[in-house]
Image (cartoon, rainbow, N blue to C red):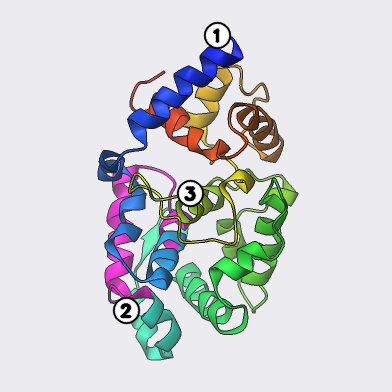
Amino acid sequence: MNQKELKEFLDAKVVQYNMPSFLESDPIQIPHQFSKKEDIEISAFLTATIAWGNRKSIITNANRLMQMLGNSPHDFIMNHEQSDLAKIQGFVHRTFNEQDLAYFIHSLKNIYTNHKGLETAFSLNSEPSSMQTAISKFKEIFFELPHQSRTTKHVGDPLKGSAAKRLNMFLRWMVRDNSTNVDFGIWKSIQPSQLSCPLDVHSGNVARKLNLLKRKQNDAKALAELDTNLRKLDPIDPVKYDFALFGLGVFENF
């Protein structure tokens, strides 16, 4: 396919998959349970954090996590006492455990208390066509409190080579408009043009088959290459193609 044909093909796939039916099998359904901005972004952040592995397991464990937080994640984070952390005992998703979760709760309270919330913490260091430096700086803020070194692996750092798939996905959820009732569009200080595609096995493999990506590893360099090529197709909303690449990979075995 030439670039015009590729754009037409992928634009059609975006329309096909960027639909409410997408929610039925995707972890983004978790923040859709909430209406308050802070509940949406906190539930989305925590869900994105554990979004690796089997999607049914991700959704099950994210729902369990919301129940542990009393289905009011912002209230729990801001008003919990040390004794309330007993409610999260036994939580585990793959390598993310209750000790990691306890730090995340502690850090999120610090971010809302001292950094004006998640949106501000992410937007402070954003660049006109990239959020990757901002993600790295966010990680510094997130781990500015005493923490176990093992917990840091649960937040990617693009400046240290990570594709930061889960954080890029979280940003897509928060920033892209909600015209199709999939993403939320509740963050106004960041534009879709600044976002990067969440790069994982599925989107990476499809991107390579479509000659959007040549690098074999799914790392920060691959993400930069994919970013460049997706911006040629749509500089205003390049990350919309996440729906096309992911849908082709997961639902069509492209």
Alpha-carbon span between mark 2 and mark 1: 54 Å
Classify residue 24 as left or right of residue 204: left
Classify residue 194 as left or right of residue 188: right
Amino acid type of the residue tagged 1 in the rendering = Met
Question: Which residue occupies the foreground of this view, 213 or 107?
Answer: 213
Residue 224 lies, in percent from the top left, at 70, 36
Q: Would you say residue 193 sits in the magenta stretch?
A: no
Q: How many marks?
A: 3
Question: Which residue occupies the foreground of this view, 251 or 41?
Answer: 41
Residue 136 lies, in percent from the top left, at 69, 58
Q: Which residue has dot 3 on it?
A: 176
Amino acid type of the residue tagged 3 in the rendering = Arg
Q: In terms of secondary structure, where does tag 2 sit? A: helix
Amino acid type of the residue tagged 2 in the rendering = Lys
Residue stretch rendered in magenta on the structure: 46-73
Q: Is residue 196 above or below residue 156?
A: above
Looking at the rendered image, the quarter that the N terminus falls into is top right
Q: Crowding at label 2, few (<14), some or many (≥20) Cα neighbours within 10 Å?
A: some
